[in-house]
Image (cartoon, grey):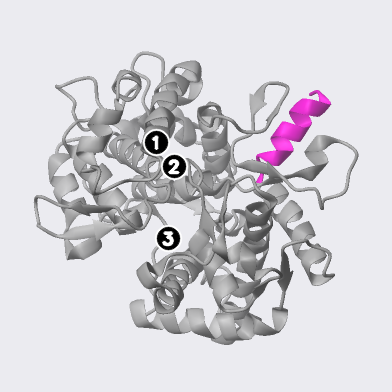
Amino acid sequence: MTHDQQTIAYLRTPQAIRERCDRVLDLAEANQLHYFGCDLTQLENVARYVIQVMQDDYPDFNIPFHSRWQHFEVGNVPRLAELSQKLAGLTPLQKAQTKFDLAIVSVLLDAGAGADWQYCETQTGQVFRRSEGLAVASFRMFCQGMFSSNPEYPLQADTKGLQNLTVEQLAQGFQVSSTNPLLGLEGRVKLLQRLGESLQTHPELFGQENPRPGNLVKYLLSLSTREGEAIEGSLIDKVMETTDNLSKPNVIGKLPAEVVLSAVLEGLGDIWSGRLAIAGVNLGDVWSHSALSGDKPSDHYIPFHKLSQWLSYSLLEPLQELGLEITGLDELTGLAEYRNGGLCLDLGLIVVKDPAILQQRHLPGSEVIVEWRALTVSLLDRIAEAIRKQLNLTATQLPLVKVLQGGTWTAGRKIAAQLREGGVPPIQIESDGTVF
């Protein structure tokens, strides 16, 4: 493996995310950052605030993963039950493949909608905004077969259906108009079109004959283990063929969460445009910050892989439904996005050095945003530790993915709504529809 290949492989790991972000936090504690400082005396207060939010929403602390699936049930509408009815008669494997198709497309369409967009669901008459609105809109488009090229199999996303998607189709599906603008509309369409192209270039991940995101299920099954050994083909075949609807499937194997992220980063790495690259390989959600020391350009790179990690979290539940036990949940990191980052800033854990920063809009690659995101990732680990300590829980009992859901994301939205009209984040980002 060449040095470039080693660097690329490293920057695709959650270990790299933590190590680089922790270096930024160390600089903040030493007051050596240009834009932000850090006040760790506020950590216990932030933990208490998040615990209160968790208790309000999940009084029994039976918290689901921070994933796309929670958004599909917004407004107390049983959309997932509706999807299950549509999938009746399919094998568990086919159901998981369909859910992968839906989750991958929906997450990639989820970058910040902006404060002026909303979606009115025809089926219920309810109006939704932001992430929930994007979830419901993408769910309805998926159920209408908008991402499939095969009318006989509308409930799928495939290479031709994604490549042929137009701005007009997405605008119609998301009810976009001059009075209902959606940030980064063209960027979202291009992202899905590039996904369609990428499916063809990774047949080992997405299949040879009918490339689709859902075929990633088979690939991940092949990487799972049972009693330390690779799962036998006969067990995989059993999952593929059976039509039993088991409410609690037998555990057929184990799969580390980091393996899911690795597959996502490998298979979707080509879809991000205008990003940093090494030896022609697109790095995705990786950005540069001059405060990090080193002689090589890559020494200054900070990976976040926000959408890829959230997507990985969103793929875990369909895998669990197949009978896979997901291990190493806390190997993945917190998500570097504006709700988590806003929570840290609004409650004084992150301290802005120049208030003018809050009055300006910033590009995702600006050092203001990179600094803010890096501090957010590291502080989420510390918030989670403080919450577990106050509740006397272990990381196994309350993994980071549940702290995020329970949790920091909701708390960030709540404090934003209290402090600013429309609940906008404290720092404004010039989004292209592919980062947040």
Q: Which residue is mark 3?
A: 65
**Residue 239 x, y percent position in the rendering:** 33, 36
**Residue 131 x, y percent position in the rendering:** 35, 55
Quadrant containing the N terminus in the rendered view: top right
Q: Earlier in the sequence, mark 1 or mark 3?
A: 3
Q: Earlier in the sequence, mark 2 or mark 3?
A: 3
Q: Are marks 2 and 3 in contact (CB under 8 Å)?
A: no
Q: Which residue is mark 1?
A: 188
- Residue at (79%, 62%) from the top-left corner? 33
- Which region is colored magenta? 1-13
Q: Nearer the viewer, residue 221 or 15?
A: 15
- Residue at (70%, 55%) from the top-left corner? 18
Q: Is residue 85 visible?
A: yes
Reply above or below: 419 against 204. Answer: below
Secondary structure predominantly adopted by residues drawn in magenta: helix
The image quarter in which residue 2 lies? top right
Secondary structure type for disc 1: helix
Q: Is residue 104 left or right of residue 23?
A: left
Q: Which residue is mark 2?
A: 433
Q: CA distance from mark 2 to mark 1?
A: 6 Å
Secondary structure type for disc 3: loop
- Residue at (14%, 49%) from the top-left corner? 82
Residue furthest to the right? 295
Mark 3 residue type: Phe
Q: Is residue 362 left or right of residue 252?
A: right
* In magenta stretch: residue 109: no
**Residue 193 x, y percent position in the rendering:** 39, 25
